[in-house]
């Protein structure tokens, strides 16, 4: 979405995935959501800018 990419990790055991999700604030995505390509992250990237005076 908007040029952003996401990394999808797969785990053989749900318990390992749960530990990863908690440690890195991850999100579950089902195979169906992945195939459809409609999944969107709950995290919103906020761009923060500064006014810079390059003349002085």
Image: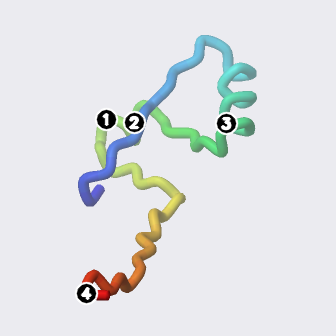
The residue that disc 4 covers is 55
Q: Are marks 1 and 2 in contact (CB under 8 Å)?
A: yes
Q: Residue at x 45, y 31 (%)?
A: 8
Identify the residue shown where x is 74% and y is 21%: 15
Q: Residues within 10 Å of mark 3 (few under 14, many from 20)?
A: few
Q: Earlier in the sequence, mark 4 or mark 2?
A: 2
Q: Which residue is mark 3?
A: 21
Q: Position of residue 9 (x, y in %)?
A: 50, 25
**Residue 13 placement: quadrant:** top right
Q: Is residue 19 above or below residue 37?
A: above
Nearer the observer, 53 or 20: 53
**Mark sitting earlier along the chain (4/1):** 1
Q: Residues within 10 Å of mark 2 (few under 14, many from 20)?
A: few
| Residue designated by label 1 | 35
C-alpha distance separating marks 3 and 4: 47 Å
Q: Which residue is mark 2?
A: 32
Specify the quadrant that holds the C terminus.
bottom left
Badge 3 element: helix
User: Along the line of sight, which residue is nearer the eye, 11 or 55?
Assistant: 55
């Amino acid at each position: 979405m908007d040029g952003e990419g996401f990394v999808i990790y797969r785990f053989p055991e749900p318990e390992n995935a749960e530990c990863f999700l908690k440690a890195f604030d991850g999100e579950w995505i089902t195979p169906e959501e992945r195939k459809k390509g409609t999944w969107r992250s709950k995290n919103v990237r906020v761009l923060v800018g500064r006014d810079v005076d390059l003349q002085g």
